[in-house]
Amino acid sequence: MKVLYSCLSKSWGGMEMFTLTAVKQLIKRNINVELVCIAESRLHIEANNIGIIIHPIKASGYLHPVSTIKLSSIIRKGNHDIIHTQASKDLWLLVPALKLINASTPLILTKQVGSAIIKKDRLHKWLYNRLTYAFAISRVIQKNLVETCPLPEEKIVLIHNAIDTKVFSPEKSDGRKVRNEFGIASGDVVIGMLARFSPGKGHEEFLKAAAELNKKHDNLKFLIVGEASRGENDYAESIKKLAVEYNLGNAVFTGFRSDTPEVLAAMDIFVFPSHGEAFGIALAEAMAMEKPSVCSNSDGVLDIAVDGATSFLFENKNSLDLAEKIEMLISSPEKRNEFGNAARKRAVENFDIEPLTDKVLKIYSDAIKNN
């Protein structure tokens, strides 16, 4: 099987990271994969390290005649069995390129981000009619595809984003190194979040909740893990200033970390305060690491966390409710242990990358067979 993968994004977040994860899984199955990406993007740089053919393209916006012609040439010469994109915006290049050479190659879109725009006009019907399948990464995205896109429901398949639960395993990761790095005492309770610095990720609520919790406890540490994406440095600085305003001397901004399992292992409680996440890969990773969590009660989080079993859900954007739910876990090591065990079990059963890759490959095979 020969697959052309596509993600024409300049950013570096969940979608771009998962693109790389999915490509690596295909390589692991001895599948020939090529990648179309934005030239000199972070994805381009990271993909250079995994030994695949990369087709860098310079394109921003929607209509690019020169890039379309270049892409049609790549498709014609590549003789791919499947084309799979992680970004719906890529369809504006992929579909014209396929039409230009009259190629019947099955085309699959993974819908990673919801849209408030109704796309049922004639042009979008022409675009989406070319899709063989659209993968929805959560129920909220599945509903969004039905409501906003000109797709019959039989073309929409629910396939969650996945994680490697063998890598994200509490048995293989030791949090002591990270705790020692940041001077965290053995008796400290570490409460952390992991997200890029971007509006809507819930950093403000997390810091406000931290300030409330500091009024009751003197043994807390707050880890804020992540970096600013392209164009978000000012926002990141505003969050760091907010921590100073709240007098959060026990808050640690770790920056980007490549040792995510070890960072998660250092935490006692994981917080996922995002205002509206399509899925929430960091939450699934934390659950695989046996971490109890407190999460916003919204969108894709509801596919992952189970209130009262793996997590406590708090009212979206309500920092006081967030603080109260975190307090319930701080005060009960037994509940933390109970939630953590249930979280690991749920992550392995529902979000492990091996069975989900099997499912994707079965759909690939059926699409090729029926083409």
Image (cartoon, grey):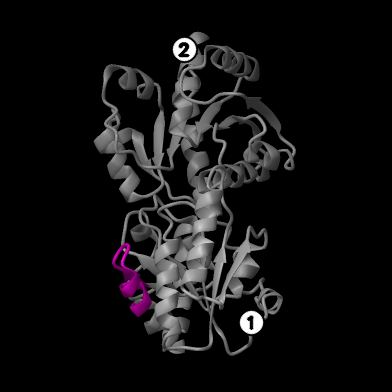
Task: Locate the N terminus by quadrant.
Answer: top right
Q: Which amino acid does label 2 sit on?
A: Lys
Q: What element carries label 2?
A: helix
- The reply to whether residue 369 is visible in this rendering is no
Is residue 161 left or right of 115 when viewed as pictured? Answer: right
Q: Distance between the residues labelled 1 and 2?
A: 58 Å
Where does the magenta region start and end? 312-324
Q: Mark 2 points at which residue?
A: 99
Residue 11: x percent and y percent?
A: 55, 41
Tag 2: Cα neighbours inside 10 Å, few (<14), some, or many (≥20)?
few
Q: Is 268 included in the stretch rendered in magenta?
A: no
Residue 292: x percent and y percent?
A: 46, 75
Nearest the eye: 360 or 54: 54
Tag 1: Cα neighbours inside 10 Å, few (<14), some, or many (≥20)?
some
Where is 36 relative to 28, above or below? above
Where is 174 relative to 131, above or below? below
Q: Which amino acid does label 1 sit on?
A: Ile
Where is 154 relative to 281, above or below? above
Q: Name the residue under label 1.
A: 184
Nearest the eye: 142 or 17: 17
